[in-house]
Amino acid sequence: MTTNAQEFARARGAMPGGVNSPVRAFGSVHETPRFFVAASGAYVTDVEGREYVDLVGSWGPAILGHAHPAVVKAVQDAAAHGLGFGASTPGETELAELIASRVVRDGAAHPVERVRLVSTGTEATMTAIRVARGATGRDLVVKFAGHYHGHSDGLLAEAGSGVATLALPGSAGVPAPIAAQTLVIPYNDLDAVREVFAARGAEIAAVIVEAAPANMGIVPPAHGFNAALADIAHANGALLILDEVLTGFRVGPAGWYGIDPVPFAPDLITFGKVVGGGLPLAALGGSAALMELLAPLGPVYQAGTLSGNPLAVAAGRATLDHLDAAAYARLDAASTTIADAAASALSEAGVTHVVQRSGNLFSIQFAETAPHDYDTVKAQEAFRYPPFFRSMLEQGVSLPPSVFEAWFVSAAHDDAAVARIVDALPAAARAAAAGAPD
């Protein structure tokens, strides 16, 4: 039998850092990454044969639980007819129709009239920005510090020295002129939004925002923030791109768009994770007028050999078909129980913290007051998370290996799975209390 340490050593000899996505290296939690070989329901199993209750859920797609029978069967049935054709299939249309039909608010507002399927969330947001630029004839994009929209060059940007300052590259290999097409401003700060539009409004094609941010931990939008964004953008001839790659179809049947306390009108919405049911698939949608700017009807080019792959489409359709009211009720109840138990355990151990929530997504922030933007997120006592994480892992609970990630509960987290998590929390809280800065 191999071990996780042996697998990691082997992986480092074949892949940069031993991983194909950086967070998998477990660097921020100072632990050997686990190499999983099986998953079912709320559980994952590593190469050493150890089972864990999973709160990563493939970073969101396993919303029904791992290897849900209906999703597996749908993929198997699709595979039996061919892995891909390089041509259109009826399943693509059915999934696009299903996405459009679910994104509705108050029985009336339908912001998605056309859908383009792609393979990753990065592709979806990159394409949405291209459409916005094509629609407006403008170049600049506004994004918020701490929001992640994939790893395309223009979105790996860091804030400049002032609100209206063009951004700096956030990664080696990103040309400064590309990063300079992005304006990075503080989140939940409408004055900053107004200031950047006052200074550069005639050049701004779009504002892109996570519907309810989940890539710096959970930091909910201030009441009415998304609606105000839409109003400001539209008043200046720009578009609002709503990134629902994480929240879409997870926090509710219509994503965050459907549950935001204040109705608003996004122009383009991007989807990922849940919409592919665990296989590589993402999407963007919007009005017919905007979406039909895409080739072959319009001048905005986008293509993908594997876009709308029949196996991924089948997984996405089966997942959405089984996300009914009962599934959301189970998901919400389990999430609430776990989040409340985490807060209770940390309080009992005397650990300063807040648990931030957006629907059934939540995360722990080791701070006295709820962070509202990236600067306040970074100011927390993040050193408390690695010992907390390691304690949970030792007790058979797999958490996201970073304090800056959301916890993903599934509809398969039954009473037994939830109890295992709850039972592990007091020891983890005591470990966090004993943590110290490096």
Image: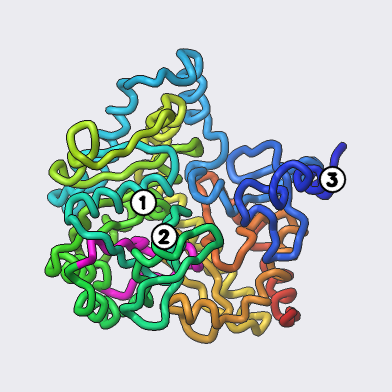
| Main SS category, magenta section | loop
Whole-angstrom CA distance, mark 1 to mark 3, is 37 Å
Q: Is residue 117 above or below residue 105?
A: above
The residue type indicated by label 1 comes to Thr
Residue 125 is labelled as: 1
- N-term mark: 2 or 1: 1
x then y, percent, for residue 31: 76, 60
x then y, percent, for residue 436: 74, 82
Location of mark 3 (residue): 6
Point out the stretch of residues depicted in magenta: 203-223
201 is within the stretch colored magenta: no
The answer to whether residue 45 is left or right of residue 251 is right
**Circles 2 and 1: CB distance less than 8 Å?**
yes
Location of mark 2 (residue): 155
The residue type indicated by label 3 comes to Gln
- N-term mark: 1 or 3: 3
Q: Is residue 178 visible?
A: yes
Whole-angstrom CA distance, mark 2 to mark 3, is 36 Å
| Mark toward the viewer: 2 or 1 | 2
